Amino acid sequence: AQSVTQPDIHITVSEGASLELRCNYSYGATPYLFWYVQSPGQGLQLLLKYFSGDTLVQGIKGFEAEFKRSQSSFNLRKPSVHWSDAAEYVCAVGAENTDKLIFGTGTRLQVFP
Amino acid sequence: DVKVTQSSRYLVKRTGEKVFLECVQDMDHENMFWYRQDPGLGLRLIYFSYDVKMKEKGDIPEGYSVSREKKERFSLILESASTNQTSMYLCASSSDNQPQHFGDGTRLSIL
């Protein structure tokens, strides 16, 4: 069965530090991959997506993610974190299309000044 | 930009009440979705709709129904609200094979 794992429930970093949030999925073929960000009390905002092609994708707010087929991973990265990046980050996977998505349980990012 | 609007940000209802959550999108998307979000469980799909008057059950449809009479509007109905339906409800819309766009959510409390 298709599944998505975000191993880190909570991550704390200092402002200006680099960031990597992990996302692993279970699916035989190449899935549709997404990262969303959710501020407190808000809905989900799309950061970036991967459908095919170049495995390194750029998103909004200076984020990027890399699809690694051999590791079944789609990790989110940012070279220098800002205090405004504090939020919940959710990875999502679609097996055959973008309609039936499986969502990870999210990683809460806390940023210290 | 896609705009998905949920009618209420916060809602408090009593057990046994019939509850309506409304969602409107302005991008002529074919697909609309209702999710609930609970701590430690992530987003779970309740119902989705591919077209007007079309609906399909998601992973947790029990206790819910939906209505899509117009393309831009998708309503979630709790026929008889129960305390275990206290949650954050998120609506989303998309066109075919494009990312889903989400509303700001409705935090529903059933007392």
Image (cartoon, rainbow, N blue to C red):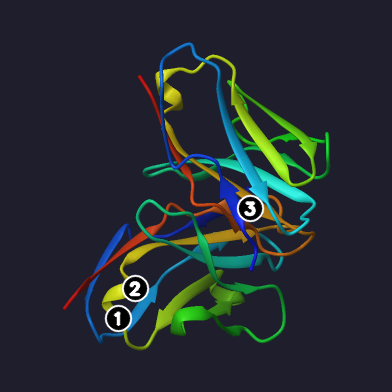
Q: Residue under mark 1: which chain is it in?
A: A
Nearer to me, B14 or B85: B14
- Residue drawn where x is 23% and y is 82% of the image: A15
Q: Residue at x 31, y 85 (%)?
A: A18
Q: Residue A53, image x and y in percent?
A: 71, 83
Could you say where residue B94 lies in the image, as x and y percent from the top left? 71, 57
Pointers 2 and 1 in contact (CB under 8 A)? yes
Disc assigned to residue A101:
3
- Nearer mark to the viewer, of 1 and 3: 1
| Badge nearest the viewer, 3 or 2 | 2
Q: Quadrant of the N terminus of chain B?
A: bottom right
> Mark 3 or mark 2, which has the lower sequence index?
2
Bin the neighbour count of mark 3 within 10 Å (Cα to Cα): few under 14, some 14-19, many 20 and up: many
> Can you say which quadrant of the picture contains the C terminus of chain B?
top left
Q: Position of residue A94 (x, y in %)?
A: 66, 58
On screen, residue A88 versus residue B37, left or right, reads: left
Where residue B34 appears, as percent x and y from the top left, is 61, 41
Q: For the residue marked with disc 2, what is the amino acid?
A: Asp
Label 2, on which residue?
A: A85
Which quarter of the picture shows residue B22?
A: top right
Q: Secondary structure at mark 1?
A: loop
- The type of residue carrying mark 1 is His
Residue A65 visible, this angle: no
- Residue A65 position (above or below residue A11): below
Instruction: Look at label 3 and name its amino acid.
Output: Leu
Q: Residue furthest left?
A: A113
Q: Which residue is mark 1?
A: A82
The vertical placement of B27 against B80, above or below, is below
Label 3 – label 2 distance at C-alpha: 24 Å
Residues indicated by labels 1 and 3 sit on the same polypeptide chain: yes
